[in-house]
Amino acid sequence: MELWYFILEVVLKNLVVISILMLFVAYLTLAERKFLGYLQVRLGPNRVGTWGLLQPIADGIKSFVKEDIIPNNADKPVYVIAPMISFVAALSMFAVIPFGQSVTLFGREIKLVIADVDIGILYIFAMGTLGEYGIVLGGWSSGNKYAILGALRAAAQMISYEVALGLIVIGTIILSGSLRLTEIVEAQRNVWFIVYQPFAFLLYIVAALAEINRTPFDMPASESELACGFNIEYSSMKFALFMIAEYAHLVTVAALTTTLFLGGWLGPVLPGPVWFILKTCGMIFIFIWIRGTYPRMRYDHIMKFGWKFLFPAALANVVITAFIVALR
């Protein structure tokens, strides 16, 4: 009986988290377009529903009913599977991110995390790397030279910045002494890690933006050069899956930033999940603000910045953090 309760709990957690995440992603697209419109002195979506509130629903319907075209020279099995890989990987990353303390329901203690595993950070990096396969395979299987160039750019950029991203996170692991995300949050009960690691926090934001191909690091999909990049040959729901994966990855990165540097769900007065959502939304706001503020970088500048500045700076942060902790 206990096993069936456990299975039911896991299934319900997955349904609730995925449903909320998908709804959040849908309206994040509207919020981003509205905020960018404000920054650029224009209105943004305002035709479908009051203040454009039904625009995400209209976009979803459009994606379902549009013609699904597969190029003749595409590798069809890989072409179909690629967006699914990115989509599943992006949703799976949220499984280990805690969004509150345990609660008691019907006499059972329920953790507000789908899977509280010992190697939570390693799991997130593994899923993030798996998502890159979707982008690379999608560009390669399309049989289009612009798509292949976009896929190659994405592979080089993601690998370059993922190395630095892993080094940056090591600082928080050293401070908490654990790879489990719930323990990393608990280690910040007195002082958030952003106080101890302000430089690492800034480096993390830069590396995370490059990892998820967000402006100013959106070279894999630069319209002026690659006419949309790796997903140029995709249409209908396959294209929508890539977009959903991108925004879901954005939410995950913001949630992980909250967990690693901003104390996760910790905060006074308000319930833990409320604090978690507020902090995550604050990070998403910063990411959108950066997109509306900075122009796209040149590709060779992106690679030089990643290897000649970000990587050495992340390595120096690890060494200094380890040295200080050892002295203490």
Image: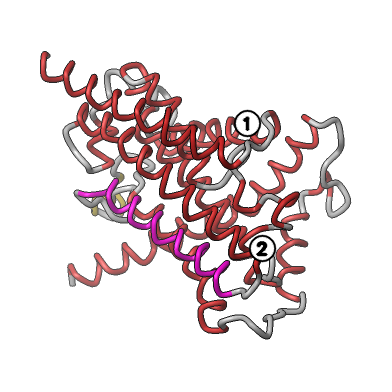
The residue sitting at 71% across, 65% down in the picture is 60
Q: Toward the viewer: 286 or 215?
A: 215
Q: Position of residue 159 (x, y in %)?
A: 41, 49
The part of the chain drawn in magenta is 119-141
Q: Is residue 116 left or right of residue 33?
A: left
Q: Which residue is mark 2?
A: 146
Residue displayed at 66% across by 49% down: 27
Q: Residue 22 falls in which quadrant of the image?
A: bottom right
Residue 290, quarter of picture: top right
Note whether 152 is above or below 67 in the view shown: above
Asked whether disc 2 touches disc 1, contact meaning CB atoms under 8 Å apart, the reply is: no
Relative depth, front residue between 146 and 9:
146
Q: Nearer the viewer, residue 33 or 185?
A: 33
Residue 87 in view of the camera: no
Nearer to us: label 2 or label 1: 2
Q: How many marks?
A: 2
Query: Which mark identifies residue 273?
Result: none
Image colouring? secondary structure
User: Around disc 1, counting alpha carbons within 10 Å, would you say few (fewer than 14), some (14 to 19), or many (20 or more)?
Assistant: some
